Image (cartoon, rainbow, N blue to C red):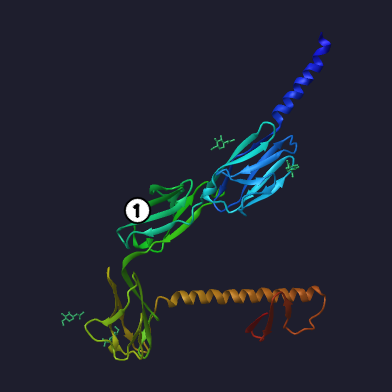
Amino acid sequence: ARRFQWPLLLVWAAAAGTGSAQGVQTENVTVAEGGVAEITCRLHQYDGSIVVLQNPARQTLFFNGTRALKDERFQLEEFSPRRVRIKLSDARLDDEGGYFCQLYTEDTHHQIATLTVLVAPENPIVEGREQAVEGGEVELSCVVPRSRPPAVLRWYRDRKELRGVDSRQENGKVWSVASTVRFQVDRKDDGGIVTCEAQNAALPPGHSKQTQYVLDVQYSPTARIHASQAVVREGDTLVLTCAVTGNPRPGQIRWSRGNESLPERAEAVAETLTLPGLTSLDNGTYTCEAGNKHGQARAPYVLVVYDPGAVVEAQTSVPYAIVGGILALLVFLIICVLVGMVWCSVRQKGSYLTHEASGLDEQGEAREAFLNGGDGHKRKEEFFI
Ligand SMILES: *[C@@H]1O[C@H](CO)[C@@H](O)[C@H](O)[C@H]1NC(C)=O
Ligand SMILES: *[C@@H]1O[C@H](CO)[C@@H](O)[C@H](O)[C@H]1NC(C)=O
Ligand SMILES: *[C@@H]1O[C@H](CO)[C@@H](O)[C@H](O)[C@H]1NC(C)=O
Ligand SMILES: *[C@@H]1O[C@H](CO)[C@@H](O)[C@H](O)[C@H]1NC(C)=O
């Protein structure tokens, strides 16, 4: 009896094979709006039967490889015994739905590939509610009008995340999302950057859309006077510069001199006051003043005009003298070393002193020539090529 079991088993296996293997198989597809989607129908043991592809409205796109619907966005990419592959370019939201892959054999097979269209967020729109003023609060809103799935919004300031208050609204198939943040601002925040970042599954992993917002914080002005020189003698020309800050920037800078009027020779242009041909009569406290709608600032400068011959030890002259002394010493040392090197190289060549006490060294980018004046007085010249 055992002998006859083998042929029976084979007949059963063949019947099972023809029954289940003829058919189609598809996969669901996700595409970003405007992108390219590929819908693939895998064929099993294809025997030349008719293959029909239909869109979600059950209109026939391709009838056994021949275009049926006049929509050039659909292209037949492949029709082989193994698979039928179509490409949809510039995918739109209303392309969404089930695409039918039908195989007409004795018993019709079909499979549905569900196409999902996602919408990537555009760069968010960031706006400030009202003008920010130092000491007050700023309220910023970040809006992404279209996204699917709803975009996740995040706020950053100096790489620190800020917590926003989110809201979302569904408009047909897409979402409008918004987020607002509030925080205190100071004058140092003026010009600072706040970033709103939007992310969803329609963007490639690790990608986001960002918009930077530059904070505009208004504040009252400050003023400081810089003088063109530290010590002023009779006959000198002094230029005073008034450095002002403030947002909005103070428009006009006013110069004054205590209760007295400015010398007639004085010339005030924008932030500078030029005082030519100074005499001791010009002594006094000079003030620059600037204002905006948030306040006023003033800076004084006490002018003391000395006699032309007066010996005045200005603080700034001391460091210059020290620096100058160090530089002179350094130059002297370098010259000594170079002279030593020239001396050594002349001796190593075994040549006797056929040259005078002057050497010429042509190495590197700098050519230096030394002229020995005989009593320790040296002149150094450098040519940079
Ligand atoms: C359908 O198309 C395939 C591939 O071009 C072809 O081999 C087959 O014969 C066609 N079937 C019919 C019924 O026309
Ligand atoms: C394809 O999508 C449809 C509809 O969303 C779902 O019912 C089906 O299970 C999905 N198939 C696969 C293989 O994920
Ligand atoms: C300015 O003049 C007023 C009166 O004319 C006087 O009281 C005040 O002390 C003066 N101020 C200065 C800085 O000289
Ligand atoms: C101006 O100041 C200098 C230095 O203090 C002084 O010598 C001079 O007399 C002053 N001149 C006037 C007019 O006050």
Q: Which residue shows up at 66% across the image and 40% down it?
A: 41
Residue 298 seen = no
Question: Looking at the picture, does residue 348 appear above or below residue 146?
Answer: below
Q: Which residue is mark 1?
A: 182
Ligand 4 appears in which quadrant?
Answer: bottom left
Question: Does residue 197 lie above or below 325 as drawn?
Answer: above
Q: Is mark 1 within 8 Å of ligand 2?
A: no
How many residues crowd mark 1 within 10 Å: few (<14), some (14–19), many (20+)?
A: some
Where residue 16 sits in the image (x, y, percent)?
A: 72, 24
With respect to residue 337, does 93 lie above or below?
Answer: above
Disc 1 residue type?
A: Arg
Q: Residue furthest right?
A: 3
Nearest the viewer among 273 and 315 is 273
273 vs 45: above or below:
below
Residue reaching furthest to the top = 1
Residue 230 position within the rendered picture, expressed as x and y whole percent measured from the top left: 38, 80
Quadrant housing the N terminus: top right
